[in-house]
């Protein structure tokens, strides 16, 4: 099952309000591991900007 971006943001906003992953998972009836994965993806995007790749003319 795929969740909408709006739903994901809503779930992650609850975490930012200070609720635990376990409580939020129970409230929205989703697995806690799903929330952990969503959180990891967001953190990686914020903290690891990608350097542009360079293509050599060789």
Image: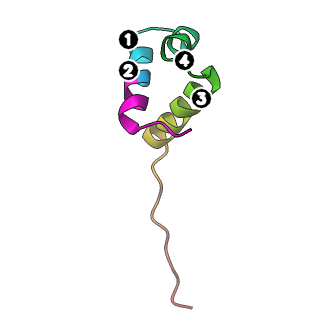
**Circle 3 sits on which residue?**
34
**Circle 4 sits on which residue?**
29
Query: CA separation, marks 1 and 4?
Result: 18 Å
Report if the CB atoms under discs 3 and 4 are less than 8 Å apart: no
Q: Please report the residue visible at 53 percent of the width from the left and 9 percent of the height from the top.
A: 20
Query: CA separation, marks 1 and 2?
Result: 6 Å
Q: Please report the residue visible at 41 percent of the width from the left and 15 percent of the height from the top.
A: 14
**Circle 2 sits on which residue?**
13
Residue 43 lies within the magenta run: no
Q: Is residue 49 above or below residue 15?
A: below
**Circle 1 sits on which residue?**
17
Residue 7 lies within the magenta run: yes
Main SS type for the magenta part? helix
Query: CA separation, marks 3 and 1?
Result: 18 Å
- Residue 18, how many percent across, how many down? 43, 8
- Residue 33, how many percent across, how many down? 64, 25
Read off the magenta span: 1-10
Q: Earlier in the sequence, mark 1 or mark 4?
A: 1
């Amino acid at each position: 099952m795929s969740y909408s971006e709006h739903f994901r943001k809503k779930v992650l906003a609850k975490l930012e309000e200070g609720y635990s992953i376990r409580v939020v998972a129970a409230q929205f009836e989703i697995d806690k591991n799903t929330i952990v994965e969503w959180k990891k993806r967001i953190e990686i995007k914020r903290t690891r900007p990608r350097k542009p790749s360079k293509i050599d003319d060789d």
